[in-house]
Image: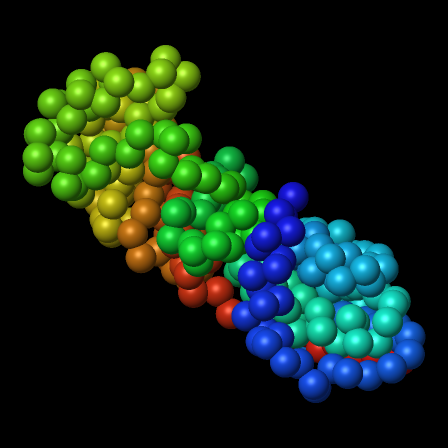
Amino acid sequence: MLPDSTVEDWLREDLGHHDVTNEVPGETTGRLVAKEPGIVAGLDAACAVFEYLDVTAERAAEAGDRVESGGTVLRVAGPAREVLRGERVAVNVAGHASGVATKTRRAVEAAREVDDAVTIAATRKTTPGLRGVEKRAVVAGGGDTHRLDLSHMVMVKDNHVAEMGLEGAVEHFRERASFATKIEVEVESPDDAPRAADAGADIVLLDNMTPDETAEAVAKLRERDDDTLAEASGGITVADVPDYAATGVDVISMGSLTHSADTLDYSFRTG
């Protein structure tokens, strides 16, 4: 649920101090219409904008649905002034979220062509203030949220290793984390993958490795045991997904799902 304060901030940013443009009398209806095919997301946020303005909003689609060009995903009714005031914010947030969902779905489908079991996940590379919207959009596209915030899992990264060493960093955080908190360790070479697992990593992040290097690292992990999860990450594009899915990794995480997704083109039409 979006807090009213978030919606207020969005509207304040768009409306400014003296909105004359939307001083339109009477009642009206409106539709949010897709101008290109894609995966629907962000309608909860769009509805929250209109409902904050006392405009009735009704979904014509659900998160994760595929919409074709010309398809209506949301209908609203209320005072024309308030409908028009909410229009741009609702279009922007739904378009952005649907773009994230659409890119995620493409990545998921690319992975499924090779391996039904591999998970496509997002990262923490989200837009400040929009993480909840973007993470929900990833789920709508069929992906996994990964960490929602730093409290959900400990990730031992290169800076931690530089400060404490790999084994020392894992031990340091294992002593401080709950028994329920998983620890993931980032490595940059195949030889370090089993080393991270031996140190106690629940998940080994194979960072910025080629598909061949990733396959080598996965093989080394599997020689050790079958319990430690292998995650590939680092500049992976949708086009790269099949090559990484073929390496045997459990998870492919992609920052581009949220930080580089195109906006799905929506139009808002009244009357």
Q: Is residue 174 above or below residue 10?
A: above
* Quadrant including the N terminus: top right
Q: Is residue 100 left or right of residue 233?
A: right
State the image quarter where residue 251 is shown.
top left
**Closest to the observer, 69 or 26:** 26
Q: Nearer the viewer, residue 27 or 104?
A: 27
Q: Is residue 219 left or right of residue 4?
A: left
Q: Is residue 170 above or below residue 37?
A: above
Image location (x, y in percent) of residue 27: 91, 75
- Visible residue check, residue 39: no
Q: Farthest bottom residue?
A: 21
Say left or right for 89 vs 81: left
Residue shown at the point (51%, 41%) measured from the top left: 144
- Return the residue nearer the eye: 48 or 103: 48
Residue 94, image quadrant = bottom right
Give above or below for 173 relative to 22.
Answer: above
